[in-house]
Amino acid sequence: MSLTASTPARPRTRNTAAALLAVALCVSLAACGGAGKKAAAGSGTDANGAKKLVFGFSQVGSESGWRAANTKSIQDAAKAAGFELKFSDAQQKQENQIAAIRTFIQQKVDVIGFSPVVVTGWDTVLKEAKTAGIPVILTDRAIDTQDKSLYKTFIGSDFVKEGTSAGQWLLDAEKANTGTVNIAELEGTTGSAPAIDRKKGFEDLVLKDPRFKLVADQTGDFTRAKGKEVMTAFLKAHKDINVLFAHNDDMAMGAIQAIEEAGLKPGKDIRIVSIDGVKDAFQAMVDGKIEVVVECNPLIGPQVMDLVRKLKDKAEVPARVESKEGVFTKDKAAAELPNRQY
Ligand code: AHR
């Protein structure tokens, strides 16, 4: 009885299951086939259904105008190259960058890039990337490591040269001065390559000359707010500052506010030497508030993507790619301002 009763039910169940499977297959085939081209946008495949190259990039943060331009250059260039960019903002924290790199390794991205917030402490995570067979590019900032095999290439500026160029401009500008020149220095993020190298390039040259004295130096973390805060403190502690050397334009712009609030004239009472070349700094040169800006080029996205493509293809890449940059004095600022892209 029970057999008779249940026997007809079995084929019905099988039929229903088969029908459901067929529907499910149709739905998934439709999704993969008919809608395939649409799914390509942002889905990891290109218009032909081929897998996109996946580039994991950990950015330092969004501390400055320079950084905003660098981020845009990386994002635009990755899009133009047809890569899938996994972008992570570390908010100037090394632990966030290490976590991002570990995530990229888990995700098995093709190439990892990062602009290291500080120079030390990368060996462990980079060994993990190497073991996973994922090539690494350093962009903008270098690291300190004995093991150069942990990354394939470094593309960015020569920060020591930038500091030296800033110092050379100051030596030339003060050539006729026989008195003492008191310098305040607003440094970038402590332990970062640009802060270490710009300081070295500038001080090694300028402080050899006994007329120049470094009366104040402190980090302003590459931000406008900190630049203003630290410059306010410098001005309270030292009534005799002649020159401000700022490791970037954002700190210089913050310092200008502090100088003006202290009732002094930037560019007259205190000469300002800065680095980066953002539009605001060019405007400040036109206004006579900054005297010279040493350019640091953030628009390296297209060159980075070239290197990413080569690494994915296992082609040779140079160990070091240096960005090209200039030095702009206030007399050239008005002509150059309309050309500035960041
Ligand atoms: O590493 C480049 C430096 O980082 C830029 O000079 C500065 O503005 C940025 O924060």
Image: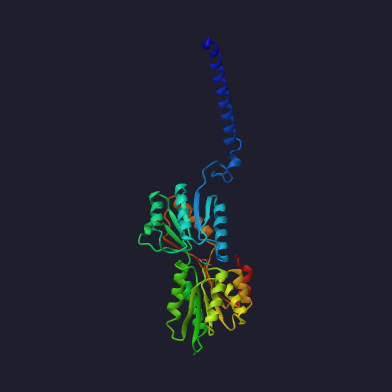
Occupied quadrant, residue 15: top right
Q: Position of residue 42 (x, y in %)?
A: 57, 46
Say how the picture is coloured. Answer: rainbow
Q: Position of residue 56 (x, y in %)?
A: 49, 52
Frontmost residue, 190 versus 29: 190
Task: Please report the residue visible at 44 percent of the width from the left and 79 percent of the height from the top.
Answer: 205
Total marks placed: 0
Q: Is residue 56 left or right of residue 337?
A: left
From this viewpoint, is residue 41 visible?
A: yes
Q: Quadrant of the C terminus?
A: bottom right
Q: Position of residue 158 (x, y in %)?
A: 46, 68
From this viewpoint, is residue 288 visible?
A: no
Frontmost residue, 341 versus 220: 220
Q: Position of residue 299 (x, y in %)?
A: 55, 62
Q: Residue furthest front?
A: 2
In the rendered image of this protein, does residue 28 appear above or below residue 136?
above
Occupied quadrant, residue 281: bottom right
Occupied quadrant, residue 71: bottom right
Q: Is residue 150 left or right of residue 247?
A: left
